[in-house]
Structures are given as structure tokens and as C-alpha cells.
Image (tube, rainbow, N blue to C red):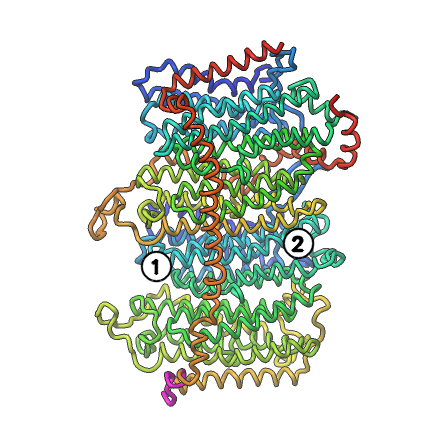
Amino acid sequence: MLEQLWLVPVFPLLGAVANLAFGRQIGRTMVSLIAIGSVALSFLLGVNAVLSFMSLSAPHGFQLRLFDWISWGAGSNAVHVADIGLLLDPLSSVMVLVVAGIGLLIHMYSVGYMAEEPGYARYFVYLNLFTFSMLVLVLANNFLLMFVGWELVGLCSYLLIGFWFTRPSAAAAGKKAFITNRVGDFGVLIALFLIWVNWGTFDFFGGPGGAATGVFDDPGRVLATQGVAFAIPMLLILGVTGKSAQIPLFVWLPDAMEGPTPVSALIHAATMVTGGVYLVARAHLLYDQSPDALLTLATIGALTAFVAATVAVVQTDIKRVLAYSTVSQLGFMVLALGSGAYAAAVFHLMTHAFFKALMFLGAGSVIHGLHEQQDLRRMGGLRRYMPVTTWTFVVGWLAIIGAPGLSGFFSKDLILARTFARGLIDPVYLGLYGLALLTVGITAFYMSRMVFLAFFGDFRGGVDDHGHAVIPHESPVSMLVPLVVLAIGSVIAGWIGVPSFLTGGTSPVSAIEVFLAPAVAATGVWEGTLEHLTEIVLTGMSVMVALAGASLAGLLYLSGAVNPVALAMVFSPFTRLFEARWYLDDFYRVAIVSNVARIASFLASFDLAVIGGSVTVVVRTVRGAGSVLRASQAGYVRGYAVTMLAGAFLVLAASWAFR
Amino acid sequence: MDGLPLLSIVLFLPLAGAVIALFVPGDQPGKSRRLALLVSTVTFLVSLLLWFGFATGTAAFQWEERVAWLPEYGIGYHLGIDGISILLVLLTTLMLPLVILSVSTTITTRVKEFSVMVLLMETAILGTLMSLDLFLFYIFFELMLVPMYMLVGIWGGERRLYAAMKFFLFTMAGGVVMLVGIIGLYLLKGSFDYVEILKAISAPGGALSIEMQLWLFAAFALAFAIKVPLFPFHAWLPDAYAEAPTGATVIMSAVMVKVGTYGFLRFCIPLFPTAAHDAVWTVSILATVGIVYGALIAAMQRDMKRVVAYSSISHISFVMLGLFAMTTESLQGSVLQMLNHGISTGALFLLVGFLHERTRTRMISDLGGIAKVMPVFAGVFTLVMFSSAGLPFTNGFVGEFLILTGTFKNAADGLQPFAIIGASGVVLSAVYLLWMYQRAMQGPVNPAFSSPDDEASNVAGGRTGLVLDDLTARELIVLLPLTALIIWIGVYPRPFLDRTAASVEAISARMAVPQSGVLASGTGARVP
């Protein structure tokens, strides 16, 4: 079955093409069937391929080379820049299942959510195209093809954020997302140049039909060249901060909420934004060689987790809370990567995909049930109107704040434990651990705040902006089923990462780490594990911190024991900073955008006046002097033809004369 | 097929068509238009024989034709194509029928003359690409000026005469200087025949002196730099592109300017290798400046056509960067990017023209929400726009990536900084294209426009202002080959890269000769 691996990405592509060609003629039911069917086939084939792969013993995974892409020449003159080929290994296995699985659920959910949309077919074309692109990104067997997927998911993100493009804010957000990502891609591009120059191939691993030695077969090659071993991972980090919304490029993700909510769930929470995490995990052999790059990554991750969490605290739009929460959770993953705990990052990527997709879809259900209301201040008490949405959402909430036993608990604790362990070698990481632990508390606070404001207390949104009465209603079954499935996943997805001190296993690490080890086990950076007792203490601490955060939110928003407005006044310097999103957007606007615009507009006038002007002078002179020319301009084509012929004769005559 | 002078047939079919068109009565515009379309389509179909019959793996000229013309002066009628020219020949024969088909509703006056000029232009361009005799090349090179001058001057916009004059003077000046260079080369080597001259130069002791090389290089380079145009020789371009009728803009931007980049690769680099190598930094600086400069100015334009005009300066500068990096990758990228630039820029100008035809404005601020009114148009526009922005799996990515990687690879000449700055053009192109798209195509629909569907649906007010129809079947036929090529080259560029590889490798191998050796032998061949 592994030979059919190529069909996994191709099915959604075919779905997109079919709906693009015929979507407007065949009716909504057929559009949905094609869109969902293609992803379902892709998922089933993906599951099948992963199962076949697991029964196979292939050290670097299974490679399937499909055809030459950028290459030329034959024999000894042949140049292979890159081929189209796929790689299935433990890392891409996890990614394929997450992408196709969550993608399938969100396709199903979208049928109900987008039912009223005029652009129904267009929506599913984009969504299928995204699924294809993301599968290319995670299945590519070389850097260049991975970059294709990397850019194409950016394209789909652009198209879907701007899906309601007649809304100026949506159009602006799409553009912002694409351009911000392009800034990150600039770094990736330069890294690709360095890879090509140093290895002469983009292939991850060598093998028949491709390069003899892949980049990861010989990662140490760049150690000989001053700075390159550091430069490549650092340049890739720029791409990571774009795609995975980290400091300094995270500014696009909150705006991306302009897109339809299922898109936010799939692209801007569960899958695309994890592309950067995947990239580092994939290229971890290059990171292992550069502790400085790793530390940079860890610092970016911890800071992003903290900063985004603080901003989430003051958001009033339910989707924006989730957006900043996503940025923050991605920060946790990046922190794990920077600690050399690649498996922990991928594990959290997976659990997060479940509970964050769940909460986004839940928020979508709320918005749907409240006639497009997204403001938390206009919600409240929804548990009485929307029981399924509420209780599945509560599962997601418990998962993200790390309630023991749920998925987020295991994955987040693994990250904290591994960061702490790294801190025993490099004390800087202890500081990052502290920051992450603090963020756990903030996360519990803002998440609880959101849940309490939306689902508990009394309903505050009786009348909408147009004066119509709003009666919340539960969403259709097609939207509730994905919620339930994701809720189950949010509970059990963590069980593959139960720490060994709880299971009493012999391995010092958890099952997911064992599974991922062939693909992402760190080499030489991080050795050893923590004492079981230390792990238990760490876990206890994070649970306590989370409980404190949630309790504080309860006091403020559930029992009303403390007035949140009064508290915000007390901490007004901070809340102002948080509300201004740490002034990062303003900084870009003032320092970069306006300056570039100033330079550009100077150049535009320069071009007009100096470069254009210099010629104008010449033209004017000639035109003024040559009244003959002036006359000829208004003349007939015949006149020109005669002139031309005369010229030709002149040339010939000259050639005879010079004989 | 071997016996047929295929190149001459392709070359002179349009000219023959132009002559026949002269005899079509002027009051039957449909007839001359159909004739031009037929002739150019047949030319394209015949030229497909060149594509399919092209032998890969050899750098030799194919379908060579050599007839003595003025043997006393070493002037011959000498044609031939190789990997450097094959793509551009096909690009030319493809674009011309598309242009003729695209203008059938916009060029309604003097259709006969228009048809003649366009066909004449096709022969002139093909002549420059096929000529292996410098004198013959020069004739075709200057011949391009005449029809283009008239296309702009007769069918152009309000300031057409100014623009046409500017274009004419500028390119003419370059051409005259090149003529001096050609004659100089003749005096040195006693022939106008490209192959003979190349052979003479490559022979031991045959290389030109460094001073001579520099002078001759400068003479050729000036003509080509104006044609390309390389910053800061682009003064003619914005006005010429903006004022020309869409059809002429497409011919200029998609095809004609490629003669400039082609000329650098065909003549400047192989004939004057030492001088070319000395010019690497100069050209790289100008090309890199052009990439950033063109992109930044494009962002500031208010007229869509001028956005595309400046963007084409930015994108053609990538080609120049790759040519002078002279690595196999960068040269392959540049040769492919010449084709890509023709496809993407040509398609963008066509789209802007189609829109202008409907909205009667090209001002971005006068548009808005067009994607809502013309969804198919918007879809095609999006694809072409991303191809221009170098999105993977479109043609632009393959070309630009190879150029930049190849440039980066040339560490011996210290070109990495140029590759890095050049890569910033990838960010900038997204900026100006998406910003234009946002303002013109997205946002609320400008009440000045409405869709033909509006009356049926319950849009408030029904139809208002201009009713904008979506792309017609004719327009889709024009765009289809271009969009197909955008994806084909993006996903499977191998047929294109295979055809260019051998010739490109021959040049990069030639340029890899230790420069000191060339110098040493060059001094011996000083002009008496």
C-alpha cells in the first residue's frame, strides 16, 4: 500500500480541480461530496500507509520518488536540483494523520457552517487545495518540495482569510498574512541557497533515484565552514516565526481571524501554523549542531508563549482569544524545539490540533448560534441553549489548561519537563522554564475567563446591533459530530504520551517519544532524563499554577467576588500594554511600513523627474528642432513605410559604395 | 523535414502575410484581422516543428541556413537556433497570434495597418533571434523599431506621440552605437558571421585585447541595456508601456525586450568574455538596484498598467542578474525566466487591458470589488499575479529560484550579497501585487460598476453604472495557453530546461576559462 502514498495528497488536489471546474454547475450536495470524499479517501489511504509503514523496518522512513521536477541534462551532465518525491517516516506519519484527520472533520463541519454562503464551491476549492498543499509540505522528501508546500499553504491561507474579500478588513488581513509570511520565507530562501551550495542536493536522505548522500545523511558537512552551521538554522527560524506566528512576525495571525471560523480552526490553529514546528523537527539534525540557534529558538518560543498569553487576557472577541492562545501554544512547541525536545513539540502539536480545533469549531458554533456575534461581553449562559457545544468546549478548555488526564496535560508537562531538564545543563533554560510555568497560569486564567464569560452566568446578548432579539440556538448535527469527535480526541490523544513514571514502563521516555525517535531523536544535545521524583514535583507545580489561574478567573467572572474592571484599573499600565498588543503592530507601522513607503514614494518622484525628465529634455529639443519629424508623426502609415524603405535602400547603397 | 528551410519559413511567413495584408481593402477590417490571425497561427504551428524536432544534448546550432549575401564584406544570410534562442522563438510565435486575437475589440481604426505592423514586428523579432550574422541581426534589430514606433504612435493613448518618440530615440541611439561596435568587430575579425567570429576568438591567440573587448562590449551592452531595460536605461519604458495600446505593450514587454537579454547572452558574454567578466559587478549592481527600485516604484503607482510596467523592470532585472552570475543554474534560470517573464508580464498586461476595456479606467482608486463582479477574471488574475510573484508550482518560481541560487553559488565573484538582496524582490513583488489586488479587485464593489447578474439577484439598486461582463470566450482562449504554461513550467519544467541545458553549459564552460589566460593571449591580438 505504500506505493499508493502519492494518492494521499493527490486526492484533495483532484477534489479542488473538480470543484473549480464544475462547482458552480453541480450543486452544493455534489460539491460537498467531492470535497469531503476526496479528503476522506486521502485520510483512509494515509492511515493505511502509516500502518503499512509501521510494520516495515526502514531506518529513515519510506521514500517514494515520483518524477523529475527541476532537473535537466542526461548521463554525466545531468543536474538534479529537485525531484517530486515523498517521505513517510514517524514524523510525517503523525503529520499526515493530523492534517487529513482534522481536515476531514473540518470539511464536514464546514458543510453546515457555510451552508448559506454564495461562494460555497469556491470555499471548498480553497479548503481542498489547502489540504493538498499541507500534505505536500509534510510528505516532501526534499527541502525544495517542502518549500512548495510551505508557500502553497500560505497562498491558501491568503485566499481563505480573504474569503469575504468585499470586507476591507478581510482583504487587508489576507494581504498582511501573505506578506508577513513572505518576510519569513525570505529567510528560508537564503537557507535553501546555502543548502544547495553546501550539499549540492535538497534531498533529506539519499537513495536510489536521487542523490547518493542527502542533507541529513551528512549534516556535519557545514561545520567546516565558518558560520554556516549557525546561519542555516537561524535563517530557517525566520521562516518559523512567520509561518508559526512567533515573535517578531506573529502579528498576522490574530488578523487572520477575518476568515471563516472553520478555516481558523484548520489552518490557523491545527495545521498550517504548525508548519514551522514541523520544519524544525524535520531539520533537527541541523539544529543539533548549533546550540546557539537552539537557544534562540527556545527564547523566541518562551517569550512568544508569554506575550501572546498576556494579550489573550484582555481580548473580548472569542476568536481573538483563541488566536492569541494559538500563538501562545505554538510558543510552547517552539520552546520544546529549542530545548531539543523535538518529540515533545510534535506531541504537543498533535494534542493542540485536537483541542484547539475543537475550541475554534465550538466558537464557530457559538457565533453561528448567535447570528454572527463574536463579542464575549454579549454572550453568557450559553450552556442552557447550546449544551453539546458547551460541554465539548469545556473538554477543550480542560485540555488546554492541563487538567490531569486530558491530552494537553501530558504534552504540556512533557515540554516543561524537557525544558527543565535542559536547564540542568544550561541554566538559561531554567529561566525559560520559569517563564513557561508562569504562562501556564496565565493560560488557565484567560481560557477560564473565556469559558465563564461565554457559557456560564446569564445571557447578555438579548438584542443585536440592529435591534433584533437574539435567541441562541444549538447548531446542526453536521457541526456537532465533529465537535464530539474532537472532544474525544482531546481527551485520549494524550494517552500515547503518558510519562513512564505513571505507566511503570521500562523506557525512560513515553510511547510517543519512542515512536518518533527514529525521525527526531536529538543527537548529542540533550541527554538523560529526569528522576521520577523530579518529574512528579514538576507536574504537581504546573497543576497548582494552572489551578491558581483558573480559580482567579472564577473569582472574577464566575462568582463575581472581585470586580474585573476594578482589577484592570489597578494594573492599568499592564492592561494598556496588553491591549496595544505590546505595540508590535504600531512599531511595524511606524518604523518599517511608513519608512519603506517614504523611500518608495521618493524613488517614484525621482524616477519621474530625474530619469524620465532627462529624456524629456532630449525629446523636447528634438521635437522642437525637427518640424519635419513633427509632421511625420501625424502622417500616414504609407509615409512611414516609404521612409523605412528609403532607409533600407540607404543601407544597401552604402554597402555598395564602400565596396 | 530536413530539406525544408524551416527557419526561413517561420521567419518570413509573417512578412508574407504583411505583404498580402497590404492588398486587402482598407474598408474590410475583419478580413485583414482574420488574415493576420491566420498567418500568425500558421507560423506558430510551423514553429512547433522546431520545438518537437529540437535536439537536446547539443550546443550546436540547428536548422542552420547559410547563403552568401554580400561575400565581399563577409555578410551572409545565416540563420540558426540553439538552446539560447529556441524558447524565445516559440514565445514570439505564440504571443503574436494571442495578441492579434486579444485586440479585436480595441483596435478598430486602421485595422489593416495594425495587422501589417504586427506581422512585420513578428518577422523583425524572429529575425533577431535567428540571425547568426551580425549585419543581418542589426537589420532586424533596427527593423523592430519602425512597426513599434507606429503601433505606439498611432494606436496609443493621449501622450502616444511623446511616448513613441521617447522610445524611438532611446532605442535608436543604442542601436547606432551597436552598429559601430559591429563594424569594429568586422574590422578586427574580417567577418560579420557570428559563428566565424566566435571560432576566431576561441582559437589560440585569437582573443581580442582587453581594451578592444571593453569598448566593443560597451557598444553592444548599451544597445541591449536600453532594450532590456537595465536600470538606469529604462526611461523610455514606463511611458511607452503605459501609452501603447495593450497589444503593443504585450509585444514590447513579453517579446521585444527579450531581444535585449538575449543579446547579452548571445553576443556580449561569449564574444567579449574578459570584458563581460569585468562587468559582472557593474551589471549585478545595476540588476539588483533594478529589482528593488522597480518593485518599490511599482508599489507607488496609481495606474495598474504602470504597476505592471515597473514590475516588469524589476522582474527582467532578475534575468540580468542570472546572466552575469554565469553559473549553470543561474543561466538556466535566466533563459527560462525570459520565457516566464514573457508569459506572466504578457498575461498581466492582457488582463489589465481587458479590464480597461470594460471599466474605461486603469486607475486603481477608481476600481474596487472587481473580483465580486468578474469572478473568472479575478481567478485568472490571481493565478497570473502569483506566477509573477514567484509562487512555487508556477513558472516564476522555477526561473527566479534558479537565478538566485545560481547567483548565490558564484562565491568566486562575491555575488552572494546580490542574491540575498535580489531575494528581497520576492517579498516586494508580493507587496505591490497584493496591494494592487486588494485595492482594485477586493473591498466593496465600486457603485460605478455592476455585474450582469445583479438585476436577477436582489442586490440593492440592481445594476448601476457600467455593467462589467466577465471574461468572454475569446479572452479565455487568449489566456488559456498562458495560464497552462504557467502551471506546466511550474510543475514540469524539464522539457524546457532540457532544451536549453547544452547551450547554457557551453557558455558557462566558456566563461569558466581562467581569466588570466584570456588576457595573456588577448594582448597578442591587438589591432594593428
For residue B226, what is the image quadrant? top right
Q: Secondary structure at mark 2?
A: loop
The quadrant in which the N terminus of chain B is found is top right
The residue at which mark 1 appears reads as A114
Same chain shared by disc 2 and disc 1: yes
Q: Residue at x 76, y 57 (%)?
A: A224
Looking at numbered disc 2 in the image, what kind of residue is underneath it?
A: Phe
The quadrant of the image that shows the C terminus of chain B is: top right
**Circle 1 marks a residue in which chain?**
A
Which mark is on residue A604? none
Whether B91 is drawn above or below A361: the answer is above
Find the distance from the CA under tag 2 to the CA under tag 1. 40 Å
Q: Earlier in the sequence, mark 2 or mark 1?
A: 1
Give the crowd class for mark 2: few <14, some 14-19, many >=20 residues within 10 Å.
many
Question: Along the line of sight, which residue is nearer the eye, A406 or A470?
Answer: A470
Answer with the quarter of the image where residue A385 lies: bottom left
**According to the image, label 2 marks what residue?**
A204
Compared to B501, does A467 lie above or below? below
* Badge 1 density bin: few <14, some 14–19, many ≥20, Cα 10 Å: some
Tell which of B446 and B144 is nearer to you: B144
For the residue labelled by badge 1, is the local secondary structure a helix, a strand or a loop? loop
**Image x and y of residue B107, in percent:** 34, 28
Name the residue rendered at 71%, 58% in the picture. A219
Magenta span has A564? yes
- Counting from the top left corner in percent of width and height, residue B389 is at 50, 47
Can you give x and y, in whole percent of width and height, for residue A554 in the image?
41, 85
Which residues are drawn in magenta? Answer: A560-568
**Mark 2, chain letter?**
A
